[in-house]
Image (cartoon, rainbow, N blue to C red):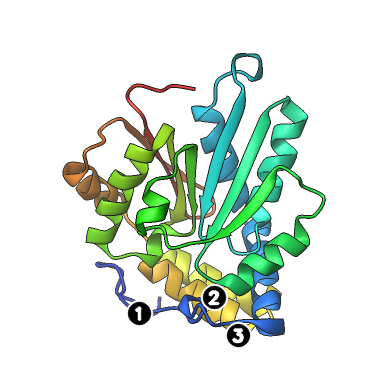
Amino acid sequence: MLNIDTSKRSRDSEIMDDFHLQGIELRKTLRDLDRINSWLGGNKVTITGIEKLLPAPAQSGIIRIADLGCGNGAILREVARWGRKRGYNFKLTGIDANTHAIEIGRELSTAYPEIEFIDENIFSPQFKKKEFDIYLCTLTLHHFKDDEIIDLMDQLHSQSKLGIVVNDLHRSKLAYVLFKAFCAVFVNNEIARKDGLTSILRGFKKEDFNEYLKNMKAKKQELSWKWAFRYQWIVKKEDQKI
């Protein structure tokens, strides 16, 4: 196996961390990343996490869900379709620091009136005033440093009514090797290949989540490993209210 160090989270940046990335290059990369996520079953991790936090449709009014680092809004559209089939009244908000990704998301979501997009810094005073029932972090958390993750999770916990669903990557040599082989056959996009491999090295092991929890205010949580090399981390509000 390749000489890959997964003992600690990588601090390398990703190409997609450049919020000025735009045009055809951004559009194609977001599309290919969405396809990879769908092919490998990643979206299901977020959906089942939401399901664990939701009350029954008959017992709920409007459910407000925010997706942080939403990209082109693919996961929001899937959540919208899932909610419609089950009778939920969702109000979905996609939040991303890349204004160009937000524009693409709006363009692709015209058939989804329950979805809106906001270009906003999640650490800004304006954002901290917002409240949602559920916050989603799908392949977003690994972009932050450990101390930032603790601060962000505390912040989102205080802003949420039901909780937080984190869907992110398991940092392992096997995941790295298998993804590299997968890309060699199925992915013809250099940014998606490079960022995907970097993302794995920036991902998490179980002990990382345990360490975060020790330093977080929230203590009610559930951590599960899911295929393909994903962690589903649900942080629940102790006094859930709708």
Q: Residue furthest top?
A: 59
Q: Is disc 3 placed on a helix, strand or loop?
A: helix
Left or right: residue 156 compared with residue 82: left
Quadrant of the rendered image containing residue 100 = bottom right
Residue 208, x across and y down, in percent: 26, 53
Q: Is residue 219 above or below residue 154?
A: above
The answer to whether one can see residue 172 in this image is no
- Characterize the local packing of mark 3: few (<14), some (14-19) or many (20 or more) Cα atoms within 10 angstroms: few
Q: Is residue 180 above or below residue 232?
A: below
The answer to whether one can see residue 18 in this image is yes
Amino acid residing under circle 1: Asp
Residue 201, x across and y down, in percent: 38, 70
Mark 2 and mark 1 lie on one chain; the one further toward the N terminus is 1
Q: Is disc 2 placed on a helix, strand or loop?
A: helix
Distance from Cα at disc 2 to Cα at disc 3 = 12 Å
Q: Is residue 241 above or below residue 155?
A: above
Say which residue label 1 marks. 12
Left or right: residue 75 compared with residue 138: right
Say which residue label 3 marks. 190
Distance from Cα at disc 2 to Cα at disc 1 = 17 Å
**Residue sitting at 23 percent across and 43 percent down?**
213
Which is closer to the viewer, label 2 or label 3? Answer: 3
Left or right: residue 67 compared with residue 148: right
Which is closer to the viewer, label 2 or label 1? Answer: 1
**Residue sitting at 49 percent across and 37 percent down?**
134
Amino acid residing under circle 3: Glu
- Between 230 and 69, the one nearer to me in the picture: 69
**Residue sitting at 26 percent across and 36 percent down?**
218
Q: Is residue 185 above or below residue 94?
A: below
Amino acid residing under circle 2: Lys
